Image: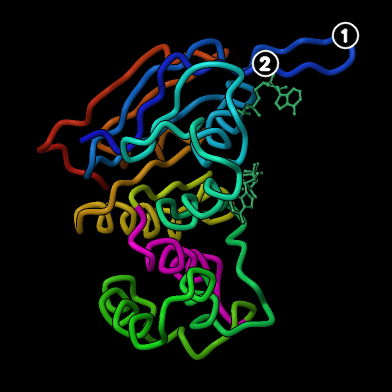
Amino acid sequence: MAILECKNIKKTYKTKNIITEALKGVNFSVEKGEFISIMGESGAGKTTLLNIIATLDRATSGVLSLNGKDISTLKSGEIARFRRKELGFVFQDFNLLDQFGNRDNIYLPLVLSEENLSLMEDRLNEIKDRLGISELLDKYPYEISGGQKQRIAIARAIITKPSLLLADEPTGALDSTSSEMILNLFRQVNEDGQTVLVVTHSLRAASYAKRVLFIKDGIVFHEIYRGENEAQG
Ligand code: ADP
Ligand code: ADP
């Protein structure tokens, strides 16, 4: 089943006399269980596309379906609820709240969706060892490294079991060793069944995905699949 479907997505920005066609008809779909990366240079349209997929912005035309649902049929209140339930987000700059401990940062999306405490604990127990965060939970974000922060952020993003995990340049603030660990973690999370979409300008980061879409001037112009037996290191 397609988790995400983009059909002829176009986005035009109008500012005063300047019209920018940021997306000129993007078509692709992501099946359940895929690990896909969208890569392109600065200005290619990645942020615009990601914001549309994240339901934070609307396309000028075209159809976006998430989990079989045409998003344009939802009212804005419904979209917020849908986003909270169906999508997980990982950012370049982690977006953790320093005034809360790491455990509470992870629980936050569950608190917002009014889940009960014991369910939160169960979910965290399921994932904490796999993510290597057991020793970090009683600390605060300002007490841990960038790579560790991103582990906490990934835990926060997947604790709701979203249909789609979206990551925007998730290694952009990390050194190469931490980047590699985080990219391997995305791979592991994907192998555990999570559908993952990573947007990046780094070919190195994109190469961890099983499938890479190349975007340029608002169009997907190329697509590659990584061989099953190819070693990564
Ligand atoms: P990327 O994330 O790949 O760098 P963007 O989606 O940010 O690309 O930008 C694609 C194009 O759309 C660029 O030409 C950019 O200048 C333009 N653009 C992006 N956001 C806006 C905006 N809010 N208003 C006007 N033009 C924009
Ligand atoms: P950028 O990669 O553009 O420098 P970020 O990585 O901070 O910036 O955010 C990427 C995109 O995600 C932004 O364009 C923003 O609109 C969106 N975003 C920011 N905060 C949230 C949030 N809490 N939930 C969902 N989307 C967000």
Query: Which numbered dot is residue 12?
Result: 2
Q: Main secondary structure of the magenta part?
A: helix
Image point (24%, 44%), residue name: 232
Mark toward the start of the polypeptide (2 vs 1): 2
Three-letter code for the amino acid on which mark 2 is drawn: Thr
Query: Which numbered dot is residue 17?
Result: 1
The residue at label 1 has a CB less than 8 Å from ligand 1: no
Ligand 1 resides in the quarter of the picture at top right
Real-space Cα separation, disc 2 to disc 1, in angstroms: 13 Å
Query: Is 181 or 100 nearer to us in this picture?
Result: 100
In the picture as drawn, the residue positioned furthest to the right comes out as 16
Secondary structure beneath label 2: strand
Q: Is residue 192 left or right of residue 96?
A: left
State whether residue 192 is above or below residue 30: below
Secondary structure beneath label 1: loop
Image point (25%, 40%), residue name: 34
Where residue 39 sits in the image (x, y, percent)?
A: 46, 29
State whether residue 21 is above or below residue 45: above
Image point (51%, 55%), residue name: 81
Crowdedness of circle 2 by 10 Å Cα count: few (<14), some, many (20+)? some
Where residue 40 sits in the image (x, y, percent)?
A: 51, 25
Three-letter code for the amino acid on which mark 1 is drawn: Asn
